[in-house]
Amino acid sequence: MTRAKGTRKPCDVQQARQRLVDARQFLEAAKLLDAPDVVATCAIHAAIAASDAITCHALGERSNDGNHGSAVDLLRQVDAKLATALKRALDRKTQAGYESVDISAADAASCVRWAEQLLAAAEERLEA
């Protein structure tokens, strides 16, 4: 396997479980809210935390890079389909979190679905 580029941080199963807790809480917050930008931002953070849990568990490391593309590359080493879900969510991060034009409700809902997919995969791996 090709080693992912970017800064990485070693992590263990305990840290993976903590990132799983974070992912659940971000996703729970996303589902309680109505504002699409905030829903999407919380869902994207859930997706990132779930991805961290997966890579910590599978590889013993997580991305520690401001460029979230590195997290996608690292997750791709574990599961290409999950890496695609993470990339799709991250592609909406700038608009949801930083731009004056709001993200659409449909795009926010997509972010929630991608986060749910990543969270389910993390739970399956860590709770097996």
Image (cartoon, grey):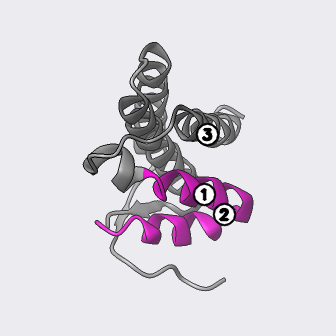
In the depicted view, which residue is nearer to us: 63 or 106?
106
Across and down, in percent, residue 51 comes to 52, 50
Residue at the bottom extreme?
2
Give the number of the mark in front: 1 or 3.
Answer: 3
Mark 3 → mark 2, Cα distance in angstroms: 22 Å
State the residue position of label 3.
110
Inspect the magenta stretch and tell me whether residue 122 lies in it.
no
Give the side of residue 98 with respect to residue 111, left or right: left
Dot 2: within a 10 Å radius of its alpha carbon, few (fewer than 14), some, or many (20 or more) residues? some
Mark number for residue 58?
Answer: 1
Q: Amino acid at mark 3?
A: Ser
Q: Is residue 108 above or below residue 84?
A: above
Dot 3: within a 10 Å radius of its alpha carbon, few (fewer than 14), some, or many (20 or more) residues? some
Across and down, in percent, residue 50 comes to 52, 43
Q: Residue at x 51, y 44 (%)?
A: 47
Give the side of residue 74 with respect to residue 93, left or right: right
Callout 1 touching callout 3 (CB < 8 Å): no
State the residue position of label 2.
78
Callout 2 touching callout 1 (CB < 8 Å): yes
Q: Secondary structure at mark 2?
A: loop
**Earlier along the polypeptide chain: callout 1 or callout 3?**
1
